[in-house]
Image (spheres, helix red, strand yellow):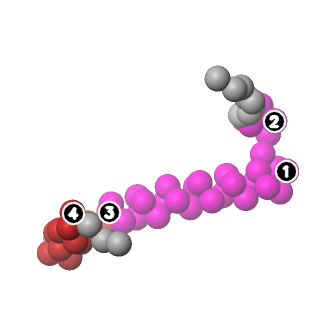
Amino acid sequence: MLDIRHLLRMKRWSQSPPSARRVKLVFGVVAVALLIIGLEKLGLWPQWATAERLNRRF
């Protein structure tokens, strides 16, 4: 369910949308992230750049 804050934020965005430069930046960051995920799933991502999971229980 939408809160009143979300509705106010959508109103502000519709009145003054982000610049084209900011939209390109966001899409660029998302594209790079998807590229990295794709390379990792295909096994083309280098081992030294892969984070190790720690299975700790506190």
**Alpha carbon of mark 1 to alpha carbon of mark 2: how far?**
9 Å
Marks 2/3: CA distance? 34 Å
Neighbours of disc 1 within 10 Å: few (<14), some (14-19), many (20+): few
Q: Is residue 33 left or right of residue 23?
A: right
User: Is 12 placed above or below 45 here?
Assistant: below
Question: Residue 13 lies in what quarter of the image?
Answer: bottom left
Q: In which quadrant of the rendered view does residue 38 lie?
A: bottom right
Residue occupying the point 66% across, 58% down: 35
Q: Identify the magenta region.
A: 22-50
C-alpha span from label 3 to label 1: 33 Å
Q: Which residue is mark 3?
A: 21
Mark 3: give few (<14), some (14-19) or many (20+) Cα within 10 Å: few
Q: Secondary structure at mark 4?
A: helix
Point 40% across, 58% down: residue = 25
Mark linked to residue 43: 1
Residue 41, compared with residue 1, is above or below; it is: above
Q: Residues within 10 Å of mark 2 (few under 14, many from 20)?
A: few
Amino acid type, callout 1 = Gly
The residue that disc 4 covers is 5
The amino acid at mark 2 is: Gln
Q: Secondary structure at mark 2?
A: helix
Q: Earlier in the sequence, mark 4 or mark 2?
A: 4
- Whether pointer 4 and pointer 1 mark residues with C-beta atoms closer than 8 Å, the reply is no
Please name the residue that numbered disc 2 is placed on.
Answer: 47
* Residue at the top extreme of this rendering: 58
